[in-house]
Image: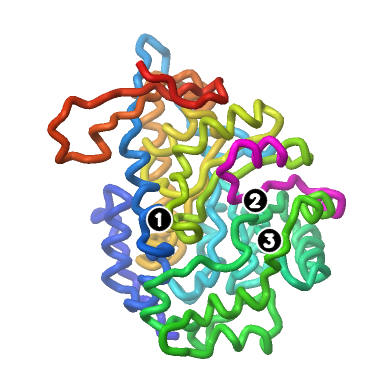
Amino acid sequence: MTAVPNVFTPGDFFALADFERAANAVLPPAVRDFVAGGSGAEFTLTDNQAAFDRLRITPKVLRDVSDCSCATTLLGSRAAMPVATAPVGYQKLLHPEGELASARAAAAAGIPFTVGTLSSYTVEEIAAVGATTWFQLYWLRDREQSFDLVRRAEDAGCSAVMLTVDVPWMGRRRRDLRNGFALPDDIVAAHFPVGAESVAHRTASGESAVARHTAAAFAPSLSWADLAELRRRTRLPLLVKGVLDPADAAQAAESGVDGIVVSNHGGRQLDGAVASIDALAEVCAAVNGRCEVLLDSGVRSGVDVLKALALGASGVLLGRPLLWGLATGGAEGARRVLDLLAAELRDALGLAGCSGPEAAGTLQVRRDAMAADRTCTAHAHTTYLDKTSHEGMVLR
């Protein structure tokens, strides 16, 4: 694997989209597509960001924000802002130091780093970096291997386990199929035996080798009974990631989980699924404070984080933008992404009249229908998002 050149120049980056453009300039096309792509026609991928764009905040005034801070608590631990990194596998595709560099950036920024089951370094190596570390688990056909990974995460000092529940198999990601995407020889899923990993390295026209590997490894039989067994088997706080349906969220809360991550997997699973931010308010209402709720998919700015907080989330997961920073400058580039997001969030909080993340829950959020189609000639219809009622939206 050829090392990605460092193109990080701090003065060139004023928005997270600047990192995306820089990353696209240096990444091999197939890797760029692997990171950027979604499933199917990518409707959900596109709608994740469009849904954020449809939302409007009504700021409050005459609030003392002289001591405005982004600091908060996530799963009982202090965090410098209400952000954790999303679990993303194979980060050595972006930079030779991969997850080690990303974890260093998270540690420096004071936020949790989530180690993926498909990470290119082991949980032990990544946890040793010193960040608050969460471990993401895919449910494997070999159940004991799943439980062994959880034990390793506990022994390595991880402070939470995050079970991904929306991947019985990988969605059809057309970009990867067109590219016949396979891993380079020097990139492996470090938690898997090398023999099994070789499946992910065999290129075949019109197929994704990574999808073949995960289809062989992941168990599509994952059920509520398995979640209950995992809850019994680990002493760590447990999150479930990939929940969009309020009834599923309520059942998860009843099952004793400590957190729910509202997520459509960044538009990479069911194409046509609801945008995560559009599902958030109803999930929060269904959970009704029984566990924390985090938001994943489509976060691209500090204002996006503010909108998620206003709709009831305790925090968000950040995925692709961290990878853009990693590709453009290793740990330094990833840290710059997080620093920029923190600056944007503090600005958004203060200008909205909030001295900290907890105050954002009192903000009013509106949906601007015109934002969905800028060519529309009709007057915009505005709806209010009801953050307390399970009924969802109330027309105004």
Residue at the image point whose x is 44% and y is 25% from the top: 393
Question: Is 243 in the magenta?
Answer: yes
Residue 32: give x, y in percent of width and height. 36, 71
Distance of mark 2 from mark 3, alpha carbons?
17 Å
Are the residues tagged 1 and 2 within 8 Å (C-beta)? no
Question: Is 97 in the magenta?
Answer: no
Residue at the image point whose x is 36% and y is 25% from the top: 366
Residue at numbered disc 3 = 137
Residue at numbered disc 2 = 132
Residue 51: give x, y in percent of width and height. 36, 41
Q: Quadrant of residue 62?
A: top left
Foreground residue among 312 and 186: 312
Q: Quadrant of residue 139?
A: bottom right
> Most extreme residue toward the top, as rendered?
62
Are the residues tagged 3 and 1 within 8 Å (C-beta)? no
Q: Residues within 10 Å of mark 2 (few under 14, many from 20)?
A: many
Element type at marker 3? strand
Q: Quadrant of residue 384?
A: top left
Amino acid tagged 3: Leu
Residue at numbered disc 1 = 321
Instruction: Read off the magenta span.
Output: 231-252
Are the residues tagged 2 and 3 within 8 Å (C-beta)? no
Residue at the image point whose x is 35% and y is 12% from the top: 61
Residue at the image point whose x is 18% and y is 25% from the top: 379
Element type at marker 2? loop
Amino acid tagged 2: Thr
Foreground residue among 169 and 31: 169
Amino acid tagged 1: Pro
Foreground residue among 304 and 56: 56
Q: Earlier in the sequence, mark 2 or mark 3?
A: 2
